[in-house]
Structure formats: structure tokens, C-alpha cells
């Protein structure tokens, strides 16, 4: 239990498939060993207290809006907006604040990365291509996914179903 835990939000199957397809099409294949994901935390302790808290955590399932694209410098992501995501994140921050690393203490901008680790020019071109015909859409969020970090790949530990 030495590897840190990563928390993401599980999307409905249609949304997950859509984002996985975009990621497969645009993420450098040699660096793409993860499914598309909506990150909540990058680094929590993998210990009994964290696991116990997460397994007992309750929050309602909800619908989020994908409202646009985000430039990541060397990549592109879909921006996700939803009051429930922010509320869920704040509740978890309140509990885990003393344990959060610098990355997880920064401002939270929910998004799904579909391209990263490319040249700024490649990222700009994809952003412009996807942004030109973008129309907002909804995604269902139905669980918190808990993974352990394995130095690159992730190992799925368990899900916390939203009710």
C-alpha cells in the first residue's frame, strides 16, 4: 500500500467511449496507457484511513456539462462544468486538506484530457479543429473511481458508487 491513490469520476458508458476514442485518436500512442478520465485528486495516501473514508463516502449521482475545449499548452482537453462536481471536490478537500500535495491544492478545473505531450503547434491545431464545430453536451457521473499509481500505469482498486 505504498503507491498513492488517484481519484477520478466514472462517466456513463457512452461518454467514456466518446472520450476514449478522442484520446486514442489524438494522444501519442507510446504515452497513452490510460483511459480517458475526469481527475479529482492526483495523490492521496494509500492507507486504511483513506480507504475507509472513501468507501463510506456518499454523494448523489449527477449530470455534468461539457462546455468547451481547453488549451493545455502541449495538449487539449474538454472542459467540464457542474456545481455538483465542485461541491463533491470541496467536500473531499475539506476532509483530505492536510494530506493534499501541491498539485491537488491548486485550483480545480474539471476536464477530460484527450491530447497531451505533443508540440504546442499540434495542440493548437487540434484545439482549433475541435473548437470550430463544438457543441456542448451532457455526461452522466455515477461513481468515484479509486486507482493506485504504478509509476505510469494505474491499477483500479475500487469504485464508490454515487447514489
Image (spheres, helix red, strand yellow):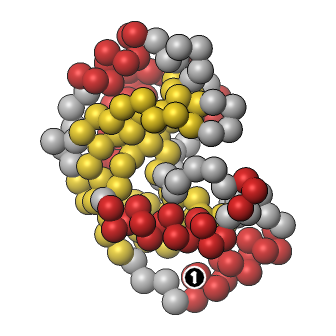
Along the line of sight, the residue nearer the viewer: 84 or 139: 139
Tell me if residue 113 comes above or below residue 149 in the rendering. below
Q: Name the spot of residue 163 as percent of width and height, x first.
A: 16, 42
Residue 93, image quadrant:
top left
Q: Is residue 17 visible?
A: yes
Q: Name the spot of residue 86 as percent of width and height, x first.
A: 37, 46
Q: Residue at x 63, y 34 (%)?
A: 103
Q: Is residue 90 left or right of residue 108?
A: left
Tell me if residue 41 comes above or below residue 32 in the rendering. above
Q: Residue at x 44, y 21 (%)?
A: 96
Q: Name the spot of residue 8 as percent of width and height, x first.
A: 44, 42
Tell me if residue 102 comes above or below residue 114 in the rendering. above
Number of residue marks? 1
Q: Residue at x 32, y 62 (%)?
A: 13
As drawn, the residue found furthest toward the top would be 48
Q: Is residue 41 left or right of residue 128?
A: left
As drawn, the residue found furthest toward the bottom would be 133
In the picture of the structure, the residue carrying the numbered disc 1 is 131
Element at label 1:
helix
Along the line of sight, the residue nearer the viewer: 6 or 82: 6
Q: Residues within 10 Å of mark 1 (few under 14, many from 20)?
A: some
Q: Is residue 149 left or right of residue 142?
A: right
Tell me if residue 130 comes above or below residue 157 in the rendering. below
Q: Is residue 76 visible?
A: no
As drawn, the residue found furthest toward the left would be 163
Amino acid at each position: 500500500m505504498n503507491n498513492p491513490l488517484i481519484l477520478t469520476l466514472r462517466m456513463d458508458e457512452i461518454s467514456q467511449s466518446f472520450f476514449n476514442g478522442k484520446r486514442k485518436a489524438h494522444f501519442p500512442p507510446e504515452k497513452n496507457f490510460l483511459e480517458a478520465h475526469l481527475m479529482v485528486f492526483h495523490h492521496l495516501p494509500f492507507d486504511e484511513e483513506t480507504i475507509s473514508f472513501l468507501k463510506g463516502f456518499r454523494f448523489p449521482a449527477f449530470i455534468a456539462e461539457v462546455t468547451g475545449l481547453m488549451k493545455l499548452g502541449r495538449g487539449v482537453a474538454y472542459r467540464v462544468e457542474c456545481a455538483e462536481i465542485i461541491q463533491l471536490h470541496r467536500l473531499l478537500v475539506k476532509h483530505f486538506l492536510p494530506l493534499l500535495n501541491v498539485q491537488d491544492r491548486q485550483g480545480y478545473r474539471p476536464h477530460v484530457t484527450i491530447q497531451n505531450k505533443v508540440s504546442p503547434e499540434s495542440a493548437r491545431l487540434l484545439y482549433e479543429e475541435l473548437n470550430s464545430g463544438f457543441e456542448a453536451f451532457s455526461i452522466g457521473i455515477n461513481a468515484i473511481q479509486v486507482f493506485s499509481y504504478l509509476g505510469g500505469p494505474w491499477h483500479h482498486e475500487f469504485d464508490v458508487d454515487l447514489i
